[in-house]
Image (tube, rainbow, N blue to C red):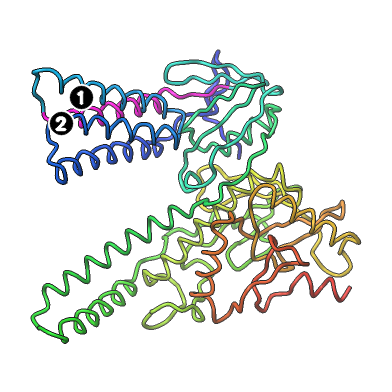
Amino acid sequence: MIQSFGVINMRGEWIGRGGWDWMFNPIFLSLEILLIDLVLAKTFTIESPNIVGSAALLLFGLIYKWVDFSSQTKLQVYMIGATAILELVIVFSEFSIDRTLIQSILCITILVVGVFHISRTRIFMMGDTIRVHGLGDKKEFDLPKTSVEVRDPGISMLLRSGELVLHRGGEIYRVSGIYRPELLRRKLIDEGGAIPHFQRASWAGTLWVFILVLAIIAFIESALFIMIYWLLPVEGVFLGVGSLFIWIIANICIFNLRIPRYPVDPAGDLRNQDRIAVGMWTEIFFENEGWVTKQLFRCGWGHNDYVRHRVPIIGSKICGKWNPLALVTIHVVMLIYQMVGVKRRIIYQDFVGALPKTRLAFNVPYRYSQEWVPKKFIQENIPVDIQSQMNDLQNELALVGLSIDDMHARNFRINNRSEIQAIDGELYTDGEVFLKSVLVRLFDGRQVKGMEPVLGCSRVVRWIDHRPSVDGIVEIS
């Protein structure tokens, strides 16, 4: 379903708005400013306006400008710079004020401006023209002469908001905080005739989010161990060993907390349609002659067998109505990365020919639609130029900075033009590939022996397991 908010007026059809989860940007910026103030106060006893404090704030503003997180960065840096100059003026005056109060006012201002930005951002479409209403300006673009991209499909991939970038001639216009920008970009291209602007995935992708989550977990686990160490009424070597033992037992208990599964069958509203396939993670339903609907399983509704996974679970590793926290966590992480892969398909299908057209079902979790590819990847359907097509897939993935994994033979199909199509498999950035490989071997190593390239293509890989390989079928044919 293509994104629209169902409002049509003299401005045109309302197709884009601000997403409130973008407020993570000004909130995090405010916390950084307050942290700098705390460090200056506690480490250097700078609690009133000071030249050093002003210089530190200016330096932070310059670094933040260089990083350039969003279209609001320039305005945010102006506010930081103005506050630093104000602090400097106060230093050389007789006026006395608490420095933390100044920084707090700055943070409140940043947050208020962020709220105004999100609430005022609107995009309207009328024919092949769009009008962008921002915080302080309005822009109009002729779509056939405009190329569009979604900036930084990395950390923003985990959020519902992101940045839409419009290119017209030499002009670049950025709109940050747009709700579901990948769907809006798709609408502008498919319905408005906009040009897909070539883009390359960032090296890190979601790696920074993963590292942040690991750091938070490490902090919590360290705090738990220290608390146990302080409270345990023993001394000497027994204190260390006992603390470690209790810490391990506590973690096992936490991992085994039983959580009820999602109460509603995720595919319940699709049961009246023809189910044409069931995969390890997905149920596939016939949508119409050209499309199929794919519903990812939630924990307890499908992909329930974790028997061969290396997880400290007491009792059954078969998920059902009540499931251990550890298995639910693993399942949710995999669902998130599969949906990240779907978002990347929606973006990069314009640049990678072997990715079939994909679209998201709006407001339906873990569900998407995909262009129907009719022929199975079996001996009689293999194209004569299979190696050439696989090499093209390899080269196109290299251009956009992605790799695709889990590409066993069942995840390829052949269309009516004898072209291979990768109907499944996750897309990873270069920075995510190594980490993903380590995690899969760590938790799933009993049934996955490793990975290997498909037909010699290093960016198209399959896990070495029981499922049929492309290489094996091609060799037989």
Find out whether the residues at labels 1 and 2 contact each other: C-beta distance under 8 Å.
yes
Q: Which residue is mark 1?
A: 87
Residue at the spot x=61%, y=58% of the render?
Answer: 426
Horizontal and vertical percent for residue 391?
A: 79, 57
Seen from this angle, which residue lies furthest bottom?
A: 238
- Residue 69 seen by the camera: no
Q: Residue furthest right?
A: 384
Q: Looking at the image, is mark 1 or mark 2 earlier in the sequence?
A: 1
Element on which disc 1 rests: helix
Instruction: Bin the neighbour count of mark 2 within 10 Å (Cα to Cα): few under 14, some 14-19, many 20 and up.
Output: some
**Image quadrant where residue 69 sits:** top left
**Quadrant of the frame with the C terminus:** bottom right
Within 10 Å of disc 1 (Cα), the crowding (few <14, some 14-19, many 20+) is many
Identified by mark 1, the residue type is: Glu
- Magenta span: 98-124
**Residue 352 shows which numbered tag?**
none
Does 414 sit above or below residue 105? below
Query: Which three-letter amino acid code belongs to the residue tagged 2?
Result: Arg
Q: Main secondary structure of the magenta part?
A: helix
Which quadrant of the structure image shows residue 225? bottom left
Point out residue 42 in the picture as x, y percentages from the top left corner: 14, 45
Quarter occupied by the N terminus = top right
Of 222 and 415, nearer the camera is: 222
Question: Residue, x 30% and y 26% (percent of image)?
Answer: 112
Report if residue 140 lies within the magenta region: no
* Residue pointed to by mark 2: 99
Residue 476 seen in the figure = yes
